[in-house]
Image (spheres, rainbow, N blue to C red):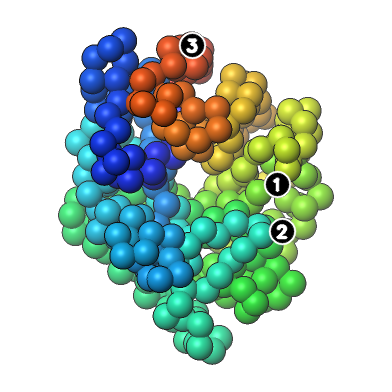
């Protein structure tokens, strides 16, 4: 039962502190007390660049990620590392190359993907804070590193993914690798992507899906898609981004055939959309209590 809290360092820099019942606590401890056992963090190539996610400050770069990874390990929780392969947000509508890679040809891009992935993971490993799961790209159903790695060029996209996965395996062959799609209720699109990557021998362990109903359909469509994927493919399944329908999304995932549903990650519960904390960092007990109930129901393991 996971949460993406990548905004945490930025919120703390603004002076926001988190509390429950009027008592200030580390937000990781609050989440853990309510059944969360996994944290997700995004990483960009050079977010401090002028066109990056965090000009000058560089939030979500390797340095910030290493600090957060240590906090997660100190809290005795597991964590998922989300590579964006961009200096800024990557999603189905935009997959911009890092500024430093813009002039690279195909062989250079392949090498850059491999080298960046391996350097990040080697640095984390040397600190004793290796991630427990890695996703190679963020919402990549339309590809990554556009235009070269667009899904309209599946051979090129597969080559980039193989480089990233090779780097993960070389640093630690036991880290599960996820391919993350933004197709929660869209079965045809999910299958088309997965089939094309599998046909090109992209080896991965987990199917990740985003689910936001305004873009990805109804809860019924989410359930239907995930059930089909669970029966069709050998990989486990994670809803790696969602916000609304907290109870229902978890119920769907933890009731998939053959126990293929590995878990969920709520997206940015600290301050975004249906967040479980208000803008001042105060816990919304009614929402956190949902996770206490779900954790008990599905016997979520404490680390």
Q: Position of residue 260 (x, y in %)?
A: 60, 34
Q: Position of residue 68 (x, y in %)?
A: 27, 45
Residues under numbered marks 1 and 2 in contact, where contact means CB atoms less than 8 Å apart:
yes
Disc marking residue 286: 3
Residue under pointer 1: 183
C-alpha span from label 3 to label 1: 29 Å
The image shows residue 266, relative to residue 168, as above or below, that is: above
Residue 242 placement, left or right of 84: right
Of residues 95 and 143, the one nearer the viewer is 95
Q: SS class of the residue under badge 2?
A: helix
The image shows residue 138, relative to residue 232, as above or below, that is: below
User: Most extreme residue toward the right, as rendered?
Assistant: 188
Q: Is residue 200 visible?
A: no
Residue under pointer 2: 193
Q: Residue at x 69, y 41 (%)?
A: 184
Q: Residue at x 62, y 28 (%)?
A: 244
Q: Position of residue 208 (x, y in %)?
A: 58, 46
């Amino acid at each position: 039962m996971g949460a993406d809290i990548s905004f945490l360092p930025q919120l703390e820099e603004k002076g926001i502190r988190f509390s429950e019942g009027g008592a200030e606590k580390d937000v990781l401890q609050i989440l853990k007390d309510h059944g969360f056992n996994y944290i997700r963090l995004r990483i960009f190539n050079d977010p401090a660049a002028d066109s990056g996610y965090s000009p000058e400050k560089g939030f979500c770069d390797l340095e910030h990620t290493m600090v957060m990874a240590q906090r997660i390990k100190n809290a005795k929780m597991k964590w998922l590392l989300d590579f964006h392969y961009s200096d800024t947000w990557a999603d189905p509508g935009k997959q911009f190359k890092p500024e430093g890679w813009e002039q690279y040809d195909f062989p250079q891009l392949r090498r850059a993907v491999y080298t960046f992935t391996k350097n990040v993971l080697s640095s984390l490993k040397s600190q004793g804070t290796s991630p427990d799961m890695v996703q190679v790209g963020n919402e990549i159903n339309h590809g990554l590193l556009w235009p070269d790695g667009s899904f309209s060029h599946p051979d090129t996209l597969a080559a980039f993914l193989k480089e990233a996965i090779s780097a993960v395996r070389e640093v630690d062959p036991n880290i599960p690798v996820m391919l993350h799609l933004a197709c929660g209720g869209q079965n045809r699109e999910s299958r088309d992507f997965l089939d094309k990557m599998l046909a090109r021998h992209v080896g991965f362990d987990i199917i990740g899906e985003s689910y936001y109903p305004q873009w990805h359909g109804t809860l019924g469509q989410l359930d239907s898609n995930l059930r089909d994927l669970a029966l069709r493919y050998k990989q486990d399944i994670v809803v790696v981004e969602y916000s609304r329908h907290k109870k229902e999304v978890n119920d769907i995932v933890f009731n998939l055939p053959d126990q293929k549903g590995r878990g969920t990650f709520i997206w940015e519960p600290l301050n975004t959309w249906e967040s479980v904390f208000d803008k001042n960092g105060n816990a919304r007990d009614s929402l956190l209590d949902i996770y206490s109930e779900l954790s008990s129901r599905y016997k979520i393991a404490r680390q």
